[in-house]
Amino acid sequence: MIPSAPNLEFEGGLWDAGLDYIAGVDEAGRGALAGPVAAAAVILPSQKCIAQDLQGVRDSKEMSPAQRASWALSIRAVCLTFGVGFASSEEIDLLGIIPATRLAAQRAIKMLTPSPLHLLLDYLFIPDTPLPQTSLIKGDARSLSIAAASVLAKTSRDAVMCEMDERYPGYGFAGHKGYGTQAHRQAIEVLGPTFIHRMTFAPMRHKLCH
């Protein structure tokens, strides 16, 4: 059963087992047509009272941009450590979106100091890590650490896409963040794909085939 808000049930069980450093990991941008995929890793203090400080944190998709920006500052302030990793559109085309997402997650995890003792992931498994891990369906709705990671991944990627909006005018990246909105697809039709578009994704793949 999915709780009404993410909590520390999974973290608490691991803390009680003596594992103080639990990293929540989540991604953003996996389904976009352009831009990188981002992943964030967050270690919260092993204190159950931390839930009160972050009681407004949710799955980032359920929050407004202003809420995400505000809570991202709070998460960065109260967490022990965090990392944000990216895999570029070129890496996505070369590796595939799932391996590229894992690569972004590995890059985020490597930035953590102290290093985590266990990973909590939102329906993702990282095969090339010695760290024990737990993959949770709808993890960002169940684990506060994963929800915090989802907020940092989303806000970090959104910032990159706003920069890309200035570099590639006319595509509206600041608005749709690279996702396949009608306006974005029309811009691709008129202007063609950019260097940051994922050429193995439709509609770019279809354009290459014709």
Image: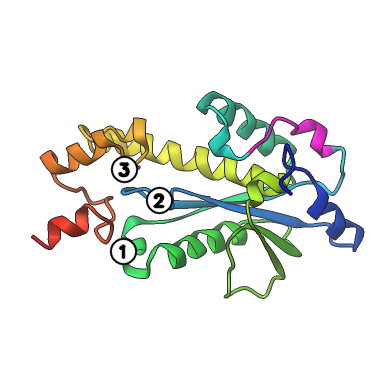
**Nearer to us in this view, 40 or 28:** 28
Q: Which amino acid type corresponds to the residue marked 1 in the rendered image?
A: Asp
Residue 180, labelled with which disc?
3
Q: Position of residue 124 (x, y in %)?
A: 58, 62
Between label 1 and label 2, give the one nearer the viewer.
Answer: 2
**Residue at the (80%, 53%) spot, across then down:** 11
Q: Is residue 86 left or right of residue 52?
A: left
**Residue at the (65%, 44%) spot, across then down:** 147
**First in sequence: mark 1 vs mark 2:** 2
Secondary structure at badge 1 equals helix
Residue 31, labelled with which disc?
2
Secondary structure at badge 3 equals loop
Residue 93, labelled with which disc?
1
Q: Is residue 193 above or below residue 183?
A: below
Farthest-out residue, front: 1
Q: Are marks 3 and 2 in contact (CB under 8 Å)?
A: yes
Query: For residue 57: magenta?
Result: yes
- Disc count in the image? 3
